[in-house]
Amino acid sequence: MGRLRERHWQDGAADYARRIRPYARLEVDEVAESRLKEGASQAEEKKAMQDEGRAILEKLKGHDGVVVALDRKGRSLESLQMAGWLGRMVLEGQKEVAFVIGGPLGLAPEVLERADCRLSFSRMTFPHQMMRVILLEQIYRWMRIMRKEPYHR
């Protein structure tokens, strides 16, 4: 959800994307974040979340792989567990995994229902720009673990 606006987030994401490339094809699709004015009503927030949800689901059309929604209320896994899970997905013939990061309002219920897995990195809330960099770092870490290469500590 949303673009990486600040240079430091762009640089961090680009660095991890570069590191991931030898292991997997990485594609980042951005969905425009709904603009809400300060003090928006609950109805306005709900509509914005629904609009964002529709845009995300549109991006997922035709995706026949696994969809992982990042959700504070999702399942919490250690890096070794997640690497094992991804390894099993590959062995089962899954060629694609889509990770979905929500915006400031979170993910619409329809997006969470579409997900095959809800993954929690923490019960805390992180800015979506930071979460993208954290996710890319973890994907790189999982790839290294799956290949039994040094990095994980």
Image (spheres, rainbow, N blue to C red):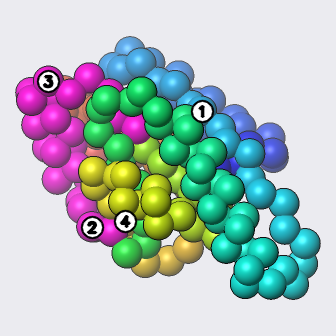
Q: Residue 25: image x %, image y %?
A: 41, 18
**Dot 4 surroundings within 10 Å: few (below 14), some, or many (20 or more)?**
some
Indicate which disc residue 29 carries: 1
Mark 2 and mark 4: Cα distance apart in space? 5 Å
Mark 2 and mark 3: Cα distance apart in space? 23 Å
**Dot 1 surroundings within 10 Å: few (below 14), some, or many (20 or more)?**
some
Q: Identity of the amino acid at label 1?
A: Asp
At x 53%, y 64%, the residue is 108
State the residue in front, 83 or 43. 43
Indicate which disc residue 120 carries: 4
Per the rendered image, the range of residues in magenta is 74-98
Check contact, mark 4 vs mark 3: CB within 8 A: no
| Res. 35 in view | yes
Check contact, mark 2 vs mark 3: CB within 8 A: no
Instruction: Please identify, in this view, whether the residue under mark 2 or under mark 3 is nearer the observer.
Output: 3
Q: Earlier in the sequence, mark 2 or mark 4?
A: 2
